Image (tube, rainbow, N blue to C red):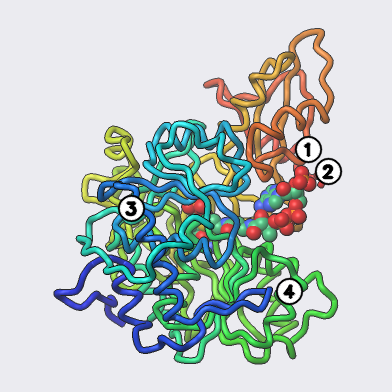
Amino acid sequence: MGEATIPAGMNENLYALLASRFAGAASSVCLELEDGRRFTYAEVEAESARFANLLASLGLKRGDRVAVQVEKSAEAIFLYLGCLRAGFVYLPLNTAYQVAEISHFVHDAEPAAAFCRPESRASFSGVAHTLSLGDARSQSTSFSTVTSAASDLACIVYTSGTTGRAKGAMLTHRNLSSNALALHAYWQFRPNDVLLHALPIFHVHGLFVALHTALLNASRILLLPRFDAGPVMRLLPRSTVFMGVPTYYVRLLGEPEFDADMCSGMRLFVSGSAPLAADTLREFHARTGHTILERYGMTETGMNTSNPYEGERRPGTVGFPLPGIEVRVAGPGDAPVGAGGIGQIQVKGPNVMPGYWRLPERNKEEFTADGFFRTGDLGRFDEDGYLSIVGREKDLVISGGYNIYPKEIEMVLDELPGVAESAAFGVPHADFGEALMVAVVPRPGAQLSEQQVIGHVKGKLANFKVPKRVVFLQELPRNTMGKVLKNELRAAHGGAKPAA
Ligand code: MCA
Ligand code: AMP
């Protein structure tokens, strides 16, 4: 299968591509909500025009950033599409982020406008225009989508960094369009597909992978505000495609009434963002008859590899490079290693971001001399070309599909009086895959409790970054270079049952 491409001469704006696919489906339902509201594709076009007009009326310049921290809703999707249409750069923010986290994004990205919940307005002080989703109501429902070049920025998505500071991955219209087309073709979307959408829409999985493929297909999207096993099970019989992080599948399997009948109309279950345990894959197959399709991606690259739609979906692997994308496993000197060898996964293709926002020095380090992006993941190709992720060079914890960079947690912990030093690390967790745990070395004479440590992080960082458990140590295990041995901490304390 070749690379899916955008027809020559077409406006390269991502919205223009999506609209070209749903133009013939004006009266079909695009979004169906839990409260019964439905929006046809014609209504999505009209409602997104309102947001494009609102943004255009503010006098923003092309390429200005629009920061968005709002609950998942139909209006949030209209805002996203409206922002694309008007040629501004969409900057989604997790609703769990706290004031201190937001202030870094605002300072770094300098958005010209921000959409937020009324109670969060203070977080965006300094932004010229702070708005809410209701503000577009009086705007016109017609808007001519601006013409964008393939290399124009469509979105900036922040992803936490090893330095403790989140970096903005710059994503162009071409990055997003090419990946949407590749996935739509590879996963063989069909005319009557119905997507059950339970993922958050402030990260790549829910916003791009799920939404773009469905919109390209003019599909009906059953939009849930969040993942909850009950509503998902209720809607599965009306769906054909579902995408989730491994925790969603673990939670569905934890429901005794979850069964094959519920899934009899389903065509495709996709998993990603974190490793899917081979046991989960097997148990899911035994219960439903469906083999979950696991794929691998990153904020900086979109999706890179996927298990095949037809053919064997091999447990513990993330499949093959997607058409048009080069994926290699590289050793010292960035030389590719052969099948069976372990090395860093590196990626090149139309999906890969041009770089991080305003970090030119960093960008030089993140790409090889021949233009491959260094993912920081360690992988191995088997003899049949299936890629497995065998580890990470980056010190990263993935909990319930959310990334947590230990450095950020350690910086916050070290501010707490009484803490001499700290180390954050991931431990196995049945529900979240990995759970965050911290080791704290108190200063001599200091009295610290687990509640105090947890309480200190709560309120400063998003709730999913709050440690589930704290252990107090007299010193941290270190190697001769002074580097903290996280593997030793994991081995010593990983068996301890996390508090939540
Ligand atoms: C919530 N909590 C968490 C998490 N989510 N703690 C650790 N890890 C989490 N992921 C906190 C809650 O704030 C709460 O804290 C306590 O844990 C229990 O909450 P619970 O009710 O169980 O959580 P939930 O609301 O049900 O959420 C769990 C969830 C959710 C449904 C798994 O986290 C989720 O939807 N995750 C998907 C993330 C995602 O979209 N990732 C894709 C990123 P307290 O009790 O203190 O209030 S894109 C990406 O990674 C790349 C590009 C890719 O390949 O896709
Ligand atoms: P993010 O920072 O949200 O872009 O997360 C990207 C990271 O998630 C990747 O670099 C991987 O470490 C991890 N990831 C994504 N999909 C998978 C998968 N299927 N299996 C294992 N890890 C994954």
Label for residue 57? Answer: 3
Report the residue at 60% width, 49% height from top. 95
- Give the SS element for disc 4: helix
Mark nearest the camera among 4 and 2 is 4
Report the residue at 43% width, 57% height from top. 341
Examine the rendered structure and indicate whether residue 77 appears above or below residue 285: above
From the viewer's perspective, tell me whether residue 308 is left or right of residue 331. Answer: right
Q: Quadrant of residue 31?
A: bottom right
Instruction: Name the amino acid, label 3.
Output: Ser
- What is the spatial separation of the Cα atoms under label 1 and label 2, in whole angstroms? 6 Å
- What is the spatial separation of the Cα atoms under label 4 and label 3, in whole angstroms? 39 Å
Instruction: Name the amino acid, label 1.
Output: Arg
- List the residue tagged with mark 4: 231
Chain-order first, disc 1 or disc 3: 3
* Cβ at disc 3 under 8 Å from ligand 1: no
Q: Are marks 1 and 2 in contact (CB under 8 Å)?
A: yes
Q: Quadrant of residue 20?
A: bottom left
- What is the spatial separation of the Cα atoms under label 1 and label 3, in whole angstroms? 49 Å
Q: Quadrant of residue 496?
A: top right
- What is the spatial separation of the Cα atoms under label 2 and label 3, in whole angstroms? 50 Å
- List the residue tagged with mark 2: 499
Chain-order first, disc 4 or disc 2: 4
Chain-order first, disc 2 or disc 3: 3
